[in-house]
Image: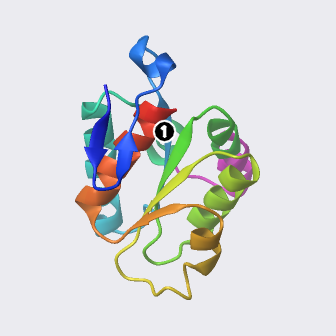
Amino acid sequence: MVQHLGATPVVPSAQFLAGRVPKVYLAAPFFTLAQLWLVEQTRTQLQQFGLDVFSPYHDVGVGSADEVVQADLAGLREVDFVFAVADGLDAGTLVEIGYALARGVPVVIYCENEGEEDLKMMSGSGCIICSDYVSAIYRALWTAVSL
C-alpha cells in the first residue's frame, strides 16, 4: 500500500507491515511548564499512533549529569528515529540530535521559532524540519512506518 503525500510517497516497510513497532526517542527540553506540556502532548500523540516512545523525562527523569547522561545515550542507542523539539536550541536536545545523526539515526525536528541560520547544521545533515506541530507529528509517523 502506497500513500501519496504531495510528490513524496510513504511506503511502509516490510518490518512495519509484519507488526514491528518502531521506537522513537523524544528529545526536548522540559524545564518550563510550556515545555513540559509539549513533552506530555507529543509523547501521548506518538503513543496514540502506536509508536514505542522513549522519553528522557519519563523514562530517566531529572538529575545530575552523572545520573542521566548515560541513561539518555543508552536510550538513543535503542531507537529507530528521533523526534526533537528544537525551539530554544536547548543544549541537551542538540547533543541528542548530533548523537543520533552520528549513529545514522533519522531525525524529525519540530521548530517554529528559530531561523534558518540556527538550523543550518540540522538541515544540511538530512534532518526533516517542520515549522508546524501537526506536520512534524505526521512526518514522525511517516518516518516510523518506512523504517
Q: Residue 42 or 49: which is nearer the viewer?
A: 49
Could you tell me which secondary element the residue under label 1 belongs to?
A: strand
Task: State the quadrant of the N terminus.
Answer: top left
The answer to which image quadrant residue 122 occupies is bottom right
Question: What residue sits right under mark 1 in the picture?
Answer: 24
Q: Residue 2 or 102: which is nearer the viewer?
A: 2
Residue lying at the far front in this picture: please name it.
Answer: 7
Expressed as whole percent of the image width and height from the top left, the position of residue 109 reads 46, 61
The answer to which image quadrant residue 71 occupies is top right
Total tally of numbered discs in the picture: 1
**Compared to 98, does 25 lie above or below?**
above
Tell me which segment is drawn in magenta.
62-71
Q: Is residue 21 at least partly visible in the picture?
A: yes
**Compared to 12, does 124 lie above or below?**
below
- Please identify the dominant SS of the magenta region: helix
The answer to which image quadrant residue 43 occupies is top left
- Tell whether position 70 is magenta: yes
Kindly identify the residue that appears in the image at 44 percent across and 42 percent down. Answer: 143
140 sits to left or right of 98: left
Expressed as whole percent of the image width and height from the top left, the position of residue 56 reads 52, 45
How is the structure coloured here? rainbow
99 sits to left or right of 16: right
Kindly identify the residue that appears in the image at 62 percent across and 37 percent down. Answer: 75
**Compared to 143, does 86 lie above or below?**
below
Q: Residue 39 or 127: which is nearer the viewer?
A: 127
